[in-house]
Image (tube, rainbow, N blue to C red):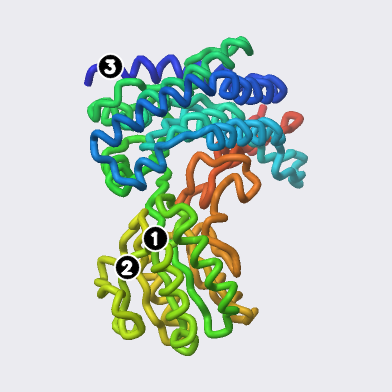
């Protein structure tokens, strides 16, 4: 190992101690300043992003990857606005989530404190550089940012905005450290630093997640693939189901909360599926379906079991006709990735059963899968959507980047008074 990443992590660890003892007003001003810097340096950030996009096209990146990489004035403005929403949130540090008085007079508290140093390992999306930094810093943590080579220039330009804000507030720049050298061996070095890094969060394709999980000696929360399902129940409103299908699949197919599989109750399939298939075809969606789906349209390709496991991140959708809600839930249990599941139904009992029996990080009843997003769920931004069942599950905002510890207050109590004998 070169020691390059260890040196960066050591400085970031020292910065984490400064952030942990900073007051909430200072951290709020810091995140507001970051948003202002992004606005002020928009031209530089967009120029850097244009260079990344040109390099990506030359390298043959997929349309979905290019979409995740692309920034424009509206997207950059949304990043700044997300930072302002994070800044405006209540300070989580020091919050007492539980307090009780024990019979012996001890007061037992559970109190929120920072995690420490968080390593963020991600691909393509330059907005993660800003979002992850803002969330970590708001929660009193420092962050190591290791973005992908495809977003190299964009990440540097955004990091320059973050560092300008840190200097303005008199805080160490190392609190948001960008690992500019994206060589794979540096990721390996990063994942071994169990004495410095408290948590690693990988966010990207399945290959990246597996690589991090297999090589890490630090705790990992996985933002795993989104094999998201829409189940159209026999009691569904067809118009509502169609709207949720089109929004979930086509509004932005390259994101993790986009739909990948449509499940349709057999009783409603003969009427609903032809309309759905026509609407999907009109929007350029390739459909891979079961035999009953194929029987309704010659354009439907046969679906394999591997198709039902796939996160396409593209205008491709798997479809299966199921006998009932039990069959739909069995399909989801076999092929789902614990990300997002949707049911469309007017039957409250069916909706309740679906919610109880799915284990995904978000379950939507008559609402688009695209709402499984930190900003949409009131978090301002997210550092990722955890599909790991640890202290955080689903979109991770500021609160998810803290932990609770015990604080015990007494007035001299000892556990075994007899041991003090005279």
Residue 416 seen in the figure: no
Within the image, what quadrant is residue 199 found in? top left
Residue 309, given in percent of the width and then of the height, sits at: 31, 64
- Please give the label number shown on residue 144: none
Which dot marks residue 308?
Answer: 2
> What mark, if any, has residue 3 been given in the picture?
3
User: Is 221 located above or below residue 228 in the figure?
Assistant: above
For image coordinates 48% across by 69% down, the residue present is 230
For label 1, the SS is loop
At 74% from the left and 32% from the top, the residue drawn is 410
Q: Secondary structure at mark 3?
A: loop
Q: Earlier in the sequence, mark 2 or mark 3?
A: 3
Q: Which of the labelled discs sits on residue 227, or is there none?
A: 1
Label 1, label 3: how far apart the Cα atoms are: 38 Å
Q: Earlier in the sequence, mark 1 or mark 3?
A: 3
- The reply to whether callout 2 and callout 3 are in contact (CB within 8 Å) is no
Mark positioned earlier in the residue sequence (2 or 1): 1
Left or right for 200, reference 251: left
Cα distance in 3D space between marks 2 and 1: 8 Å
Question: Where does the image place residue 375, in percent across and percent down from the top left?
Answer: 60, 45
Give yes or no for contact between labels 2 and 1 (Cβ–Cβ under 8 Å).
yes
Q: Residue at x 64, y 38 (%)?
A: 415
């Amino acid at each position: 190992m070169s020691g390059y990443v260890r040196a960066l992590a050591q400085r970031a660890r020292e910065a984490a101690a400064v952030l942990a003892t900073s007051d909430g007003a200072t951290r709020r001003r810091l995140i507001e300043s970051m948003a202002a810097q992004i606005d002020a340096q928009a031209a530089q950030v967009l120029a850097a992003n244009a260079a990344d996009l040109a390099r990506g096209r030359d390298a043959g990146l997929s349309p979905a990857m290019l979409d995740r990489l692309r920034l424009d004035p509206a997207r950059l403005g949304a990043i700044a606005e997300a930072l302002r929403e994070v800044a405006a949130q209540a300070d989580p540090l020091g919050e007492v989530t539980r307090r009780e008085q024990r019979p012996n007079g001890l007061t037992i508290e559970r109190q929120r404190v920072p995690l420490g140093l968080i390593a963020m390992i991600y691909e393509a999306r330059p907005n993660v550089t800003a979002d992850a930094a803002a969330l970590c810093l708001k929660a009193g943590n420092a962050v190591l940012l290791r973005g992908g080579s495809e977003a190299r220039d964009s990440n540097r330009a955004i990091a320059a905005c973050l560092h300008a804000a840190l200097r303005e507030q008199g805080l160490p720049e190392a609190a948001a450290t960008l690992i500019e050298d994206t060589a794979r061996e540096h990721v390996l070095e990063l994942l071994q630093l169990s004495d410095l890094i408290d948590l690693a969060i990988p966010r990207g394709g399945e290959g990246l997640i597996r690589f991090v999980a297999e090589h890490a000696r630090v705790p990992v929360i996985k933002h795993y693939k989104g094999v998201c399902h829409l189940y159209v129940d026999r009691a569904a409103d067809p118009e509502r189901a169609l709207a949720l299908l089109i929004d979930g699949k086509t509004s932005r197919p390259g994101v993790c909360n986009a739909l990948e599989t449509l499940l349709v109750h057999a009783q409603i399939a003969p009427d609903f599926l032809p309309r759905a298939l026509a609407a999907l075809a009109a929007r350029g969606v390739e459909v891979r379906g079961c035999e009953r789906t194929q029987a309704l349209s010659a354009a439907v390709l046969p679906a394999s079991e591997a198709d039902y496991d796939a996160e396409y991140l593209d205008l491709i959708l798997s479809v299966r006709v199921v006998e009932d809600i039990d069959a739909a839930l069995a399909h989801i249990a076999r092929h789902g990735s614990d990300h997002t599941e949707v049911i469309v139904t007017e039957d409250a009992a069916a909706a309740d059963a679906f919610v109880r029996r799915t284990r995904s990080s978000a379950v939507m009843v008559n609402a688009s899968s695209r709402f499984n997003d930190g900003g949409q769920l009131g978090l301002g931004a997210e550092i990722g959507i955890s599909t790991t069942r640890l202290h955080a599950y689903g979109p991770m905002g500021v609160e998810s980047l803290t932990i609770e510890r015990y604080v015990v207050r007494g007035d001299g109590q000892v556990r075994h008074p007899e041991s003090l004998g005279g």
